Image (cartoon, rainbow, N blue to C red):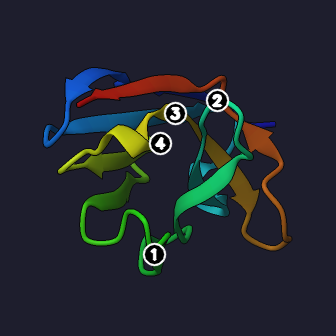
Amino acid sequence: QVQLVESGGGLVQAGGSLRLSCAASGGTFSRYNMGWFRQAPGKERELVSTISWFGGSTYYADSVKGRFTISRDNGQNTVYLQMNSLKPEDTAVYYCAAEPRLTKGYDYWGQGTQVTVSS
């Protein structure tokens, strides 16, 4: 059982940057692929970015490609999302999630961290 805790959200002006962190505990972190999702008010949750368990494979939604960077430190049991050139449409609650590397599906979720980008 993996517990995930996000941090690093906040209020930032358009064009600014934030770095989200997601600390994992209670499991072997390197056994999980990790993902960042977001959900804006009135919208469905969407996948933002993923990183494989060994960090060698990443995915980005088109809406964040070139602006966001996902990374992980398996020694620190942490996954990061560096967000640059933020836009008001990036405003959402951001969640990290863990997918066991041998199965499909994100089984474990954090509580979320709010990111608000003002214009």
Q: Which residue is mark 1?
A: 58
Classify mark 2: helix, strand or loop.
loop
Q: Looking at the image, tell me whether mark 3 or mark 4 is earlier in sequence order.
A: 4
- Tell me: 115 left or right of 40: left
Q: Quadrant of residue 35?
A: bottom right
Which residue is drawn at the image coordinates 59% and 26% (left, top)?
112
Q: Which residue is mark 3?
A: 92
Query: For this rendering, which residue is in front, 31 or 113?
Result: 113
Q: Position of residue 53 (x, y in %)?
A: 56, 67
In the image, what residue type sits under mark 2?
Answer: Pro
Q: Position of residue 46 (x, y in %)?
A: 65, 54
In the image, what residue type sits under mark 1?
Answer: Thr
Tag shown at residue 39: none
Tag shown at residue 41: 2
Query: For this rendering, which residue is in front, 59 or 80?
Result: 59
Classify mark 3: helix, strand or loop.
strand
Q: Quadrant of residue 21?
A: top left
Is residue 105 visible in this depiction of the protein? yes
In the image, what residue type sits under mark 4?
Answer: Asn
Which residue is drawn at the image coordinates 27% and 38% (left, top)?
19
- Work out how far the residue at label 2 is from the one at label 4, CA to CA, in angstroms: 30 Å
Q: Which residue is mark 4?
A: 77
Question: Of circles 2 and 4, which is in front?
Answer: 2
- Work out how far the residue at label 2 is from the one at label 3, CA to CA, in angstroms: 7 Å
Q: From the viewer's perspective, is residue 38 above or below residue 33?
A: above
Q: From the viewer's perspective, is residue 47 above or below residue 78?
A: below
Question: Of circles 3 and 4, which is in front?
Answer: 3
Which residue is drawn at the image coordinates 52% and 33% (left, top)?
92
Q: Looking at the image, tell me whether mark 2 or mark 1 is earlier in sequence order.
A: 2
For the N terminus, the quadrant is top right
- Tell me: 65 left or right of 29: left
